[in-house]
Image: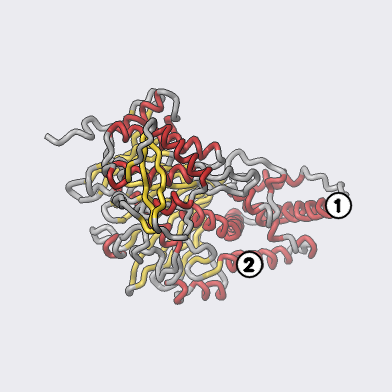
Amino acid sequence: MKNVKELQLMNIRSLKDTGAIPILPITVLVGENSSGKSTFLRIFPLIKQSIQKKTNGPILWAGDVDDYVDFGSFEETVTNDGSKWMSIGFSFDAKLNEVMARYYWSMSRFVTYDSPIEVKYSIQIEKKKEREYVSSLVVELNDTLIQFDRLQEKSTSVQVDNQIISFSPEINDEFKESESYFLWRAFSGRSIFGIQMPAVASWILKLFNEKIEKQGTNRVERDYTESALFAIGEGLVFKLSLNQIKDIFSKIDSSSKKNAKRDITNLIGNHIKNIIDWLSSLSEEEQQVELNRIKLLYFAINYFPIEEYIREYFSQVHYIAPIRATAERYYRLRNSAIDEVDYQGKNLAIFLNSLPESRLNQFQDWTAKHFGFKASVSRTEGHLSIDISRVGQEKKINLSDTGFGYSQILPIITQLWELSSRKKAQKGDAQIVPLVVAIEQPELHLHPAMQARLAEAFIACIDLAKENGYSLQLILETHSETMINYFGRAIALKKLNSNDVAVVLFTRDENTGCTVTSTSSYDDEGYLTDWPIGFFAPED
């Protein structure tokens, strides 16, 4: 799996339709106050808190004091223009054939695909009779569109490439309204509207076995129908024609009988060719119906790894709030050991105290290099205190005596360093979920020179994470012209690639009250393209 590439929101507060906003290693959100940029950024921790706890609806809008963000409720979140639904959608690349090849017979052993599958995933949320639910799920695999819609007559419509798929009565019964339908969570993994996706796959498999049996197919081959249909569906999603798929298996050396695996390969390959011959004998209309059922089977089998990745991605989101904890002179010493700075930096002293001495020394060397100071922890009579010392000076100053700048920047750089310097990822891992850090107003209380240093540290963390086998995505909501200029300068000096940064502009339409978004990028010389003149200047 790869990073989430784009995020699109519809009917969420002032964000009527953001369009597809690129999510790059550095995504900078800028705009006037109340223009919607914070709403966009907070979707990341909102989904994370919805995944972490059991809920009575798809999204946990507000919860306990330890939750990251508070959106209030569905009514307070949906766009105030009469809208009855909202939508969250994103896209990412997935090598599903590599993930599922462990469990299913995949064509990837005979053909190398030029690129992974592009997955587009979106849910639509509604509320009726005091209950929130997912009213629509749309998943696009390359150009194959799968859509589940809850209809007003309390039934579910399933479409593949805009063609409605008919189900047997027993499957339709499972689609009918039930309590589990209302309790279905947005990213729960295995079920849609209360129905288990394996039930969909099983029904399609049963249907095909009945049809294939009428063609006099060998019983042994029929046992491999699921593998055969999965391989055909994989080829269709990768935009291969039936003739191309058949040609691939026609080249398998059927004379080789050296081992059982080759026997199975031949059996499945022959079965695939028989199924394709049968499909080719159908009318164009009948053939399209069967092909769409095969695509739906392929989707149903792959549904769990898709949502598993989504859950893992948003579980790895780290959020840093705009109002961070003020420095205390002393913190109570506890025997707890933590591995993450909380979103307000309240547990910073405990985190630093939990670091092994070697790790603390590495962190101090890193802050000395990028910011010219070191942070250390003192222990006295059951309490901790954070001390700051400038490079070249032995004198330590309690964090509470250094001003707001250090207390505001320290939680940010501590979290970033810890994430990007984690133990090197193991080679051969099936997938390494990206590390996402969403930060509101990182420049708060910082002098412009320190803002530039922070921007430099962002770039350094991305490089450090890459060295350790991770990818780091930073979502930054800022008013800092200094930081935006620094990214351009870094591109000009070849410290940063121009395609690794996007600047998203949020503008509130005075007539509609809705936000209009546009994206600006840097050229290879570090200059912003499509940047509105006077964006940071006061209005006349």
Residue drawn 40% across the image and 68% down it: 57
Can you say whether 254 is above or below 540 in the image?
Answer: below
Can you say whether 124 is above or below 144 in the image?
Answer: below
Identify residue for label 1: 259
Closest to the observer: 207 or 489?
489
Residue drawn 27% across the image and 40% down it: 479
Residue drawn 69% across the image and 65% down it: 209
Eye-nearest disc, 2 or 1: 1
Is 518 placed left or right of 257 in the picture?
left
Can residue 2 be seen in this snapshot?
A: yes
Can residue 317 be seen in this snapshot?
A: no
Report the number of discs.
2
Looking at the rendered structure, the secondary structure element under dot 2 is: helix
* Residue 452 occupies quadrant: top left
According to the image, what is the colour scheme of the structure? secondary structure
| Residue neighbourhood size for the residue with mark 2, other residues' Cα within 10 Å, grouped as few (<14), some (14–19), many (≥20) | some
Residue drawn 33% across the image and 54% down it: 330
- The mark that comes first in sequence, 2 or 1, is 2
* Residue 155 occupies quadrant: bottom left
Identify residue for label 2: 202
Picture coordinates of residue 121 (x, y %)?
A: 47, 53
Picture coordinates of residue 446 (x, y %)?
A: 28, 38
Q: Amino acid at mark 1?
A: Asn
Closest to the observer: 247 or 122?
122
Marks 2 and 1 sit apart, C-alpha to C-alpha, by 30 Å
Q: Amino acid at mark 2?
A: Ser
| Residue neighbourhood size for the residue with mark 1, other residues' Cα within 10 Å, grouped as few (<14), some (14–19), many (≥20) | few
